[in-house]
Image (cartoon, grey):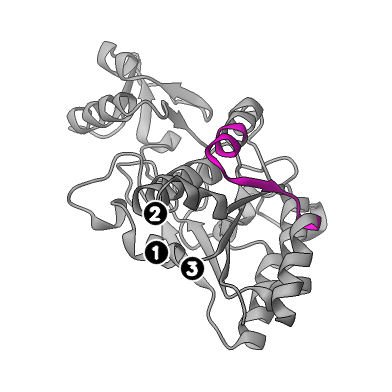
């Protein structure tokens, strides 16, 4: 009998991939390319193609943002009404002092409450990213090789790859696949996605990969690990397998990914490469 093996691919989208020129249509470009992501995605696609018959479930998460978003330059102005460039960090104190202000009239109280809540959680400080994964754009689309591989899996297995959208609420960041950084009580889509998490509870192994290892993979894995541990105890974390050659960090955040991987290893998760786990999938296919 097959073991329950679940592959979770975090945000394998064009905007996050350092694609070669021949894969980029005229007039567009990845807005937040992660160095190494294209090769990561080719390895993910190869795994699904060569060993996907051993998987019982595949889930893919998708960043889905509006152009106007609290983590995009469109939301912000400097205190003297100038533009705020991408990769600017904004602290709650800087907002309080007037160094930065929301572009929209009347947005200051809610923005201040958000930054205060975000920093009190102790996870992140607000980062202004380039506009990315805008809903309906080429950049939001899934890397072509990954999509082709899982399309083949769907046909062969007569099963649907679960697609989970996140990030459409413009008032909160949504790095994690299963919960926004500061959930909006008026928007259930930003709260803890227990229905998806419960699909992981029964998995015997959960393989996690995607982009970027320093941010969305990190946040998703941390929330998943917390949920599994709360439901099933610390031993459940041994079922998490992080595919280290199928994820890469945002430039400048290499230490954040390295520390995340070390912390997950210490909690009991396994670190493995695509070559390590392919035989596991192939053996399960033959079972």
Q: Say which residue appears at 38% left-offset and 50% top-offset.
A: 227
- In the image: residue 92, left or right of residue 214: left
Label 3 vs label 1, nearer the camera: 1
Which residue is labeled 1 in the image?
196
Q: Mark 2–mark 3 contact, CB under 8 Å?
A: no
Give the x, y percent position of residue 60. Answer: 54, 63
Q: Secondary structure at mark 1?
A: helix
Crowding at mark 3 (Cα within 10 Å: few <14, some 14-19, many 20+)? few
Read off the residue under disc 2: 232
Q: Residues within 10 Å of mark 2 (few under 14, many from 20)?
A: few
Q: Is residue 132 above or below residue 135?
A: above
Real-space CA distance between mark 2 and mark 1, rounded to the nearest whole angstrom:
16 Å
Q: Nearer the viewer, residue 63 or 281?
A: 281
The segment highlighted magenta reads 262-275
Does the rendering let one see residue 46? no
The percent coordinates of residue 86 (x first, y second) are 52, 30
Query: Where does label 3 land, which residue?
Result: 163
Residue 267 inside the magenta-drawn segment? yes
Q: Earlier in the sequence, mark 2 or mark 1?
A: 1
- 172 sits left or right of 200 in the view: left
Q: Earlier in the sequence, mark 3 or mark 1?
A: 3
């Amino acid at each position: 009998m097959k073991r329950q093996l679940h592959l979770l691919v975090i945000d394998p989208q064009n905007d996050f991939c350092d694609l070669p020129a021949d894969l980029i249509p005229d007039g567009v470009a990845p807005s937040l390319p992660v160095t190494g992501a294209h090769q990561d995605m080719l390895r993910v696609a190869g795994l699904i193609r060569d060993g996907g018959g051993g998987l019982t479930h595949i889930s893919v998460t998708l960043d889905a943002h509006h152009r106007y978003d609290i983590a995009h330059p469109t939301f912000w102005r400097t205190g003297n009404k100038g533009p705020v460039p991408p990769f600017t960090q904004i602290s709650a104190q800087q907002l309080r002092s007037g160094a930065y202000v929301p572009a929209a009239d009347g947005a200051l109280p809610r923005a201040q409450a958000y930054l205060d809540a975000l920093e009190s959680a102790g996870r992140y400080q607000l980062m202004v990213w380039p506009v990315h994964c805008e809903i309906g754009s080429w950049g939001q689309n899934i890397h072509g090789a990954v999509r082709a591989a899982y399309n083949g899996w769907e046909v062969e297995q007569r099963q649907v790859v679960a697609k989970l959208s996140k990030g459409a609420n413009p008032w909160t960041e949504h790095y994690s696949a299963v919960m926004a950084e500061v959930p909006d009580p008026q928007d259930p889509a930003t709260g803890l996605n227990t229905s998806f998490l419960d699909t992981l509870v029964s998995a015997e192994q959960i393989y996690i990969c995607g982009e970027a290892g320093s941010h969305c993979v990190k946040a998703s894995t941390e929330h998943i690990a917390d949920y599994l541990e709360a439901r099933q105890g610390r031993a459940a974390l041994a079922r998490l397998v992080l595919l280290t050659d199928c994820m890469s960090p945002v430039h400048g955040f290499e230490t954040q990914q390295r520390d995340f991987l070390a912390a997950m290893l210490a909690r009991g998760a396994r670190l493995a490469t695509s070559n390590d786990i392919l035989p596991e999938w192939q053996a399960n296919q033959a079972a």
